[in-house]
Amino acid sequence: MKRKMDLDNLGEELRVLYVAMTRAKEKLIMTGTDRFLAKKLGDTPPEDRRAWKRASDALARRGYAWSDISEGLRRYGAETERVRQLFDVTMVEYNAKADLVEKARMYKNCAISVSGEVAPEARVAIAQAANDLLTIQGVDASFVAVQVGTGVNISARSLGAVNVQVIMESLGGGGHQTMAAAQLKHITPEAARARIEGAIDKYYASQKKGDVEGK
């Protein structure tokens, strides 16, 4: 069970990374750290370094090509097929996600989707739908609210333009700037939508007030 949860969490983090990467309009700059980078580069034959350069040039010409990326990753021992499988979903999860995305409505550059109960085995679709909604043009943040028992669970996502942590905290939840959540007790999904919209209004008002005071 723990391993499955770890894999689900890793898959979720990879999906968030994928969304962030594919929203770049002109240029994508990625940084990272590797404790063993010097050793890896030292052990890399010159021909492999040239291969990385060719792969990089190919990406620049053709956009993101999985074949090029996986070839480079395999050179460092990455299990690319296992990574791809983390993105796989069951038909139940796929249908649940599609339904949640279809129900989304725009509100002040935010996509809000509310729904009744989702099958327990498909609850990962809640976060997936929130991530997918970020790929829609004009969407700065997404909120997916699903009924769970007599309450509603909310999954919120952003690429940074909107601080969903602040919005979720105003509803009793928490998280961080780009990924947050909240649980509302004894409330219907539609009433939860109204609460979310109110929290968004409050957030934008505080942002506007801060801009004015800053001037």
Image (spheres, grey):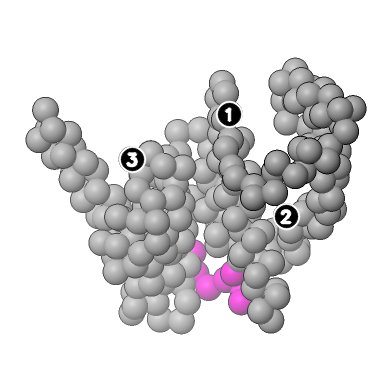
Q: Residue at x 70, y 74 (%)?
A: 4
User: Start and end of the magenta stretch?
Assistant: 115-123
Asked whether 115 or 176 is in front, the reply is 176
The kind of residue tagged 1 is Leu
Circle nearer the N terminus (3, 1): 1
Disc 1 secondary structure class:
loop
**Quadrant of residue 204 within the rendered picture:** top left
**Quadrant of residue 1 within the rendered picture:** bottom right
Return the x and y of residue 87 as percentages of the image width and height.
73, 55
Q: Say few, some or many: other residues with alpha carbon within 10 Å of mark 1 (under 14 / 14 to 19 / 20 or more).
A: few
Asked whether 173 or 95 is in front, the reply is 173
The disc placed on residue 108 is: 3
Circle nearer the N terminus (2, 3): 2
Q: Residue at x 86, y 28 (%)?
A: 46
Q: Residue at x 71, y 21 (%)?
A: 60
Return the x and y of residue 210 as percentages of the image width and height.
16, 39
Asked whether, in this view, residue 152 is left or right of residue 64, the answer is left
The disc placed on residue 28 is: 1
Q: Which residue is mark 2?
A: 87
Q: Is residue 41 placed above or below 86 in the rendered structure?
A: above
The kind of residue tagged 2 is Phe
Q: Are marks 2 and 1 in contact (CB under 8 Å)?
A: no
The kind of residue tagged 3 is Lys
Q: CA gap, disc 2 to disc 1?
A: 22 Å
